[in-house]
Image (cartoon, coloured by chain):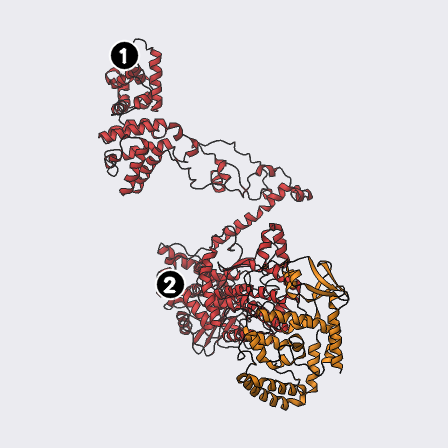
Chain colours: A red, B orange
Amino acid sequence: MTSEVTNSTEIKNVFITEAIKSAAFYSEDITEQQVITEVEQLLAQINAPGGLRGFYFVAQTLLQVLDAPGSTLQKQLEISDYVVAALRVDLQSLLSKPDNEQYSETSIGKNWAKSNPLYLVLFTANTFKGSTEDILFLAAFVSHYLMNIELLSDPEIQTTNHPRTEQVCRAIRILQPKSQTLFNVLHFHEYIKNWRASEIVLALEIFKQNNPLDKDTARYVRSLIQFFSNDWPKPRLRGQIGPQKNKREGSGIRVSARPEMVKSKTRVTPAPVQLDEQGVDQQDIEILRSHLSNQIEEETDRADYEQNSIAAIFDNDLQKLGSIDITRNLRQRNNLNTSNRLLLSAASIRLIKKLCESRLLKVGNNEAVLAIYCMLATGISLEQLTKLQIYTDEAAADNGIIVVAGQCYWRFKHRVSAVTPVGQPEYFYRSDTWVKTPCSVVLAEYINTQGLDAKTRLFSQTEQQLRRRIDKLLQRTTEKLRAPYISIDMIESFVSRFTEAADTVDPVVLDFSYQQELFSSRVSRSYVNLSDLQRMRLLDTLWQDIASYSRDDTVSAYFQPGPFIAAEEHRIGSRYLPTAEFCRQFTMQLQTDLHNAKPGSTLKLTDIVHYHNAYTRYTAWMLGFGTGYRAVYNPLPTLTLQVPDLQILSISDKDDGNFSHSRVVAVPNTLNQQLIFLKSHLIRLADLLTLFSPQLYQQVRDVLAMEQQLECMTKGQIEKWFKAIRNARDQIGPLFFLDEALNARPVSPTWLKTGNGVFQALPVNMGRHWLKTALLTSGVPTELVNFQMGHWQEGQSPLFEYSDISIMDCVAELAPQIDQLMTEQGWHACQSALL
Amino acid sequence: MTRKDGSVRLQREIDSLSQNVRWINVNTDQTPLMLDSACRQLLKEANFLAAFKARSIESIEPQRYCEFDWLQQPIIGYYDSKKTLRVFAGLFSYQQAIAHKLTTVPVFIYEKAPPPQVRRKAALAELTRILLDQQPKGGVEQLRDILCAWFKKVKVKTKKSETTAANGTENTSLANTNQTDTLTTDSITADNQNSDGDASNKNASDSNTSDSNTSDKSTAVTSEEDSKPGPPRTADIFTSEEWQSLYPGIKNKAQFCAWMGISSKTFRDKTDD
């Protein structure tokens, strides 16, 4: 009924008639047309709907606001007194019945909140609080709204969901009704004198600070503050943007990281640039993803054969597009990783434990539960598990579980990744062929009670059978308990994923213990050597972490390896790791050599050369132990790579032309000091040898003055220079030795290897092996160890653009630890005796 | 007899040094400068150039203005067969020239190389003067060590060693000592006795300076037979021919200590530990 008369102009006409009538009282000169224009203008300003539904209430509010003390609204609305007079007239008696109903309608009209926000405010104002301050507040609101309507409807500041006009009007409609107890103008009106916008902002801010508000109210108050201060933020984009959104909506441009690869036969026409209903240009958002190209329509025209044509090689645009490809690969890999790294939730772990507890030892022949248990406890995949056998014979040559004197051990062959050194001296740790890890108490009990014979497989069923059973079992259990589903993959890779995520224990422990291939390269395995005891301790730590993750302390006891009883200590891993005792002896030897080489007071030439060589040797070995420098020619090509104040050093050993393996490492205090001493040693050396060899003097001076020289060079020149001097065999850096003819030669691995007193043929990178193992076993987080060693995989580099690792934090944590390890070995900074 | 002839000839050579000398600017890019072998020999034995008290281990920049050095302490050298300029005097100026990376250096130059004894004497005169004037930072002990390294007891075979030095080889002293070593291996017992006697002599000389003359004489006598390279002895410095020719007014340790204003108790042999 009402909808039919919605657009009736009756109310407006009557109102205009009234206005003309009253205008006649004021002045004779006012034409009808003038009155009509004025009224139309007023209605437009308060954005009144067509039918003027509920105009009675609106008129009442308008009168209240206009009559408010000090109100300038009438001037602002540019309405004459006769219009105001017309507003005072109750039109009810003048209207027909349906129009009358429309006139005093109490329910709001359709879509008012969006299209007639101010009218809606005026309409609902009769439910507002009625004190003078409230009316003044409303007056100020309306006045400010009218004044800034252009700004409010600026497309720049619109959000996607609601226009700003609607937002502010909603705010006042929510905050001002009598039922709203949290917000009251009376609470803050003492801060306001003239009801100017700036005063109101201040008052609202104070109010907001002093009163605890719920989330919604606070938001509306904030809207008002923004409204009165005209301070609108650029809208944040929410929800799905970009490719996904387009895909879901089935419209817009398809986005491809590599357009030429898309073999789309249908030509996708780009949507014309137009603003959507919320005033947002959808295509605008795509610009944010600058690494993606959306110019798909150009490429679809290209014939297949053209894509591989020779001309394409010289086409710059095509090449540019092709080079973007790396991003896609990266994204794909990242996506792969995220999909693969699902961790079991804490509840799921507890559930699996419950399942195992209730079934494993009580119900006979439950290989499915056993498999679940083994997978979670060791991370061995189901495929591998089914191949394992049980042995009692130590000489057996297969992986499996070995039972010796009632003790059960997992036993795997250690995979060696480096060539075994020939004639290995006794001062390096051994590496055994077989790794034994005790089974957990539960598993040992199971094997003993089941009476599994030697030479039988651990599982009698095939992998497929087991897989089906486990799937069924997990499905049944989780459904019964309404728990989230657990897949086999999640169980078998839980331990390794947890290790990687928790970062307290290096994954190499799992690699050693259960023969898991967790590394794409062999770095970690080949640099670490762990004793059984150290390995057990690390596994214990891992299970403590898992227990605290699952919030059930009994988890660790249930799954972790049992107590280790060993007659002799076995070791696994790198064969280049010097023993702790040897490290001490070796350091001592170097220091003794250095001490013995001290020149007499006459500073004979041979003495000076001899001493310098000993000094260089000491420093070079120290550099290897302290920073994990690789065995390269001319280590430390220039002292400018070291920043003594920050305790950092840049290393580019065994690097490529793009410096993709360059790293910044922490320099322990001892080494830092030694490098400072080295500098003054070199200055003195150059002085002493000036007359014997002016060339040498010049060379050393150039090495020392490198920083000043580099400042004058361009980036390209520096790069060229650095590539020449890095690992150079003919140019010297600060570490060089002198031969009899006073020629300076850069330190080489061969030179370092020989002439270390009683120790002959030492592997030059043993410092690196030592550092990695020492850091890992002393409980340094894996991430930091890899930071120091440069053992990162694709996408983990701490120097990459998107990395947020703080080098200074790493250094602050690492340097003291390395320093302590080095001091324990006996290293200390030696001032040169030439001074 | 031969020694006297030699000394006469030497004196004649030294007298002629003021003639046949030219003052030229040398371009170091075209004419490389090198240390003369006699000088090199001295510095190899004792390198004190950077061991004086004024020193810098923080900066590599040259510290002082050196433009007057060419006049006040001129570099003196000669051309060798390879047209390289061999420097045998003005070593500190030469060091400054290298440190300042100068390309043109004014030098006194001889067309014909002076005999090695003359070059050695010139270098020794210069270095000793500077050493005694400035004194190394190692103090009296270092001073003694350096003097001992330079002023060795004149050996019986000096003649031969000098002729080899004239050929420009640098290993003269090494060859020389090897020779003497083989010659006098059977006199070890005598040496032991001598060293004992020397220690007692030294004590005597320390306590009573008037006795020092006689004790010096006695050591000189014993060392005629003994030329084994043992620890150099302080007393040998002043009896050596080179010292006597450079500082004829100072005959023994007591005079030297009094002249230098140093304690004779610190300027002495190291006691064997």
In the displayed structure, A824 sits above or below A321; it is: below
* Amino acid type of the residue tagged 1 in the rendering: Tyr
- On the rendered structure, is B78 left or right of A684? right
Instruction: Name the foreground residue: B159 vs A521.
Output: B159
Question: Does dot 2 land on a helix, a strand or a loop?
Answer: helix
Chain of the residue where label 2 is placed in the rendered structure = A
Q: Position of residue A385 (x, y in %)?
A: 48, 66
- On the rendered structure, is A182 left or right of A264? left
Question: Does dot 1 land on a helix, a strand or a loop?
Answer: helix
Q: Position of residue A316 (x, y in %)?
A: 64, 42
In the displayed structure, A515 sits above or below A758; it is: above
- On the rendered structure, is A356 left or right of B9? left
Q: Position of residue A157 (x, y in %)?
A: 42, 34
* Amino acid type of the residue tagged 2 in the rendering: Ala
Mark 2 or 1: the one toward you: 1
Q: Which mark is residue B155?
A: none
Q: Earlier in the sequence, mark 2 or mark 1?
A: 1
User: Is the Cβ of the residue at disc 2 closer than 8 Å to that at disc 1?
Assistant: no
Chain of the residue where label 1 is placed in the rendered structure = A
Cα gap from disc 2 to disc 1, whole angstroms: 89 Å
Q: Position of residue A781 (x, y in %)?
A: 45, 62
The residue that disc 2 covers is A547
Instruction: Name the foreground residue: B138 vs A499.
Output: B138
Instruction: Name the foreground residue: B138 vs A305.
Output: B138
The quadrant of the rendering that contains the N terminus of chain A is: top left
Q: Is residue A116 visible?
A: no
The residue that disc 1 covers is A26
Image quarter of residue A318: top right
